[in-house]
Amino acid sequence: MRAVTGFVFIELLVVIAIIALLAAMLLPTLSRARQQAAAIQCLNNLKELALAWNMYVADNHGVFPYNEEPGNVGWIAGGEMNYSGSNDDTNLLDLTGPHSQIGPYVLKQPLIFKCPADKSRSFGMRGTPRIRTYSMSASIGLAANGTPSGQGYWLPSIYNGGPWMCYFKESDLSRPGPSMLWLFQEEDPDSINDAAWQFNMPTMTDTAWIDSPSKLHGNAGRFAFVDGHSEVHTWHNPLAVPNVTYSGDGGDPVSYPRKVINGNVDVWWVAARTSALASGAQNDFPSD
């Protein structure tokens, strides 16, 4: 009996060792599969948001949802997120409640506002999971009072003493056209605060981010465009896009690290898809 028991025990050890070896071999594959699934879901979320946005526009005579920062009424309501336990970190009514203009068009599905790879919580890595990863271009949408005053502040737009256009209704969409004008993008969780993604139209040498894009899916960002399609853009200068840390003040320009790279082609790529000169002069930013 002892010999039989010993033999069975050895077999059990061999089986356990084989299972452990197989698990070690499969874990990297499973991890990559999860990452790929999250990246696909993120792109689908952006498509769903763009669809909801376009449904609102169709029902409102071509006028775009408001894009206030922050505002009580807009494509979303509120929106001042941080890592200090802001109510907007976790308030789903900001996304689907009565003051969210696209709320009725998302079928009460708040999960489409957050990338599955975004692990941010109300206190960075602690607290309740936050509810939003995506922001809307600051060049699109009126203020919450229905006027253009103050919109496109960082561009700067023609409504802030600058030369760049903002877009408030379908008839504004000529330069660039709907397939070249980005609408939503995945923002770095350490950068996101209000509903708008702020951007400073660069010179040909002076290039820097104001709000930061994301590297949640490797060295690439994800964008939805006004015509409803979504794209993945691989960052050519990924060092200029900080890695997410889930720390700091969350969206505070003073604490958020920004690395300036002169002639950053990624900034030019975004610029070519953000606005155009109101004078009608050609936009010289490389678009590829």
Image (tube, rainbow, N blue to C red):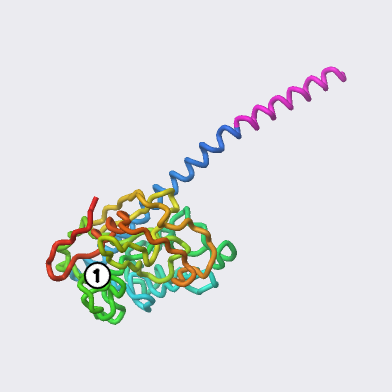
Q: In the depicted view, which residue is nearer to us: 277 or 185?
A: 277
Question: Can you say whether 83 is above or below 26 in the image?
Answer: below
Q: Is residue 84 left or right of residue 147?
A: right
Residue, disc 1: 64
Give the residue drawn at x 79%, y 19%. Answer: 7
What is the span of residues highlighted in magenta in the rendered image? Answer: 1-22
What amino acid does circle 1 point to? Answer: Phe
Give the residue drawn at x 31%, y 68%. Answer: 200
Residue 222 appears at what percent x and percent y? 35, 53
Q: Quadrant of the N terminus?
A: top right
Q: In the depicted view, which residue is nearer to us: 82 or 23?
A: 82
Residue 163 appears at what percent x and percent y? 20, 72
Q: In the image, is residue 232 part of the stretch drawn in magenta?
A: no
Question: Can you say whether 184 is above or below 147 in the image?
Answer: above
Answer yes or no: is residue 226 visible: no
Q: Is residue 279 left or right of residue 145?
A: left
Q: Secondary structure at mark 1?
A: loop
Q: Is residue 19 left or right of residue 182?
A: right
Answer yes or no: is residue 243 visible: yes
Main secondary structure found in the magenta portion: helix
Residue 267 appears at what percent x and percent y? 31, 58
Question: Can you say whether 112 is above or below 103 in the image?
Answer: above
Q: Residue 173 sits in which quadrant?
A: bottom left
Q: Which residue is the extreme one toward the left?
A: 280
Give the residue drawn at x 87%, y 20%. Answer: 2
Residue 218 appears at what percent x and percent y? 43, 48
Q: Residue 28 sits in which quadrant?
A: top right
